[in-house]
Image (cartoon, rainbow, N blue to C red):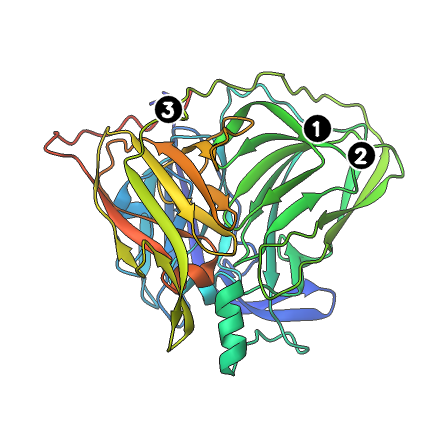
Amino acid sequence: MKTNSKVVEYHLEASAFSWEISTGKSIEAWGFNKQVPGPELRANVGDTLVVKVTNKLSEPTTIHWHGIRLPAEMDGTDAVQKPISPGETFEYRFVLPDAGTFWYHAHSNETVQMERGMYGALIVEDSTEEIMTDAERVFIIDDMKLDAKGAFTKPRWFIPRVVERHDGRQGDTLLINGKENPIIEMSAGHLERWRIINATSARYFDLYLGGNEFSIIGTDGGLLESPIPVKSQLITPGERFDIVVGPFDEGDVFSLESLRYNRMTFLRPKPEKFASIRVGRPVPSVAHVPDTLRTIVQLAVSNAEINRRVELSVGLSFKDGMDFLINGSTHVNDNPVKVAELQVWEVVNASLMDHPFHLHGFFFQVLEENGTKPSYTAWKDTINLKPRSKVKIAWMPDNRPGTWMYHCHILEHHQAGMMANFEVVADGMPIKEMPRTHKHH
């Protein structure tokens, strides 16, 4: 533990309130501390985060700390925690072992609570990082399905319900940090770090900045080994990407938009604008982004032997039109894994649509996608599977025994059965406090 580690405390109050998403347009939101997104929580690697959550909603809730390697009992699922009843307060307490862009969100009745605004960013910083940018911003992508009066819609008839269950709930009200079509002002000549979180129920966000090149420097589990220059980047529900944008010229104006991406739904994909970027007068830059960001040690070779197969599929249901399945069943209890026993899983998407696979509490490395090694190594907790595809992932269960979960992060698919709980077991080993300040170097 670093000697300068400290306890960082926050208090979140979940409640219903009126929230203005654009001038003269308000919604009845649910969220934390009467804002959408909830407060941005910040701390440093090695700090102990203490978050007291008071529930002023009319229904129970829990908070999942997406991407944090924390003790199982703090993971915020119904499997490890009694939901926080209306009027009650629960204290989450855990050490922050990794730097990166993380987020917190409701993990009870998610399809309702998250769409209404029950989410926020959790940024963990590392003073040893050598990246210096002229500014840093956090952008949380979201959408809402509203009627003409700004009320949340609910499909009344069987066919619309089946379509929403199949596609996931995707709305036409597009939000960045709780606002419609904001204007982002930048200085010419500046390099900025943008931490982007996809908090939507089902939207695939293919980031595009008017054709301008940007660099990916980090993903779910923190920094990459080196910056990756791209002109677009797909960010699926639950995923995070840290990028460096700029420098731009004075007077430049372009859109922050999502390109058309066909994830094989009933909804026809189209490009959509989320914000406008305006570049103002030049300001001297102090930015420095090194060519080497860190070293990531490979967990396994790409042809490592698989010790678990997880199949995602869709099956017909008389009651609901369709079920979303793990290994042929809904809401599965999968076999346990042992502490310190390397896991090499083949995750197969046998369906005809995309699914973002999310593993709680642990980072994995993608060894292969359809037999091909990925172009760069990264620590991930969420990975997209295209139709009829498979990925091979490797991860190490460290000494945090308890109940964990993996699921499709399209919230309606999770609700419809595409999820599993499993135990991490110590196998007779004495339980020691895991070295949570360990970095992935």
* Residue type, numbered disc 1: Asp
232, 400: nearer the viewer = 232
Q: Which residue is mark 3?
A: 299
Q: Which residue is mark 2?
A: 187
Is mark 1 in CB contact (under 8 Å) with mark 2?
yes
Give me the disc on residue 134.
Answer: 1
* Residue type, numbered disc 2: Ser
First in sequence: mark 3 or mark 2?
2
The local crowd at label 2, few if under 14, some if 14 to 19, many if 20 or more residues have their Cα within 10 Å, is many
Whole-percent x, y for residue 345 in the image: 34, 38
| Residue 173 seen by the camera | yes
Q: Measure the C-alpha gap from mark 3 to mark 2.
A: 41 Å
The local crowd at label 3, few if under 14, some if 14 to 19, many if 20 or more residues have their Cα within 10 Å, is some
The local secondary structure at tag 2 comes to strand
Q: Quadrant of the N terminus?
A: top left
* For residue 258, side relative to residue 97 (left or right): right
Q: In the rendered view, would you say 162 is above or below 328?
A: below
First in sequence: mark 1 or mark 2?
1
Q: Quadrant of the C terminus?
A: top left
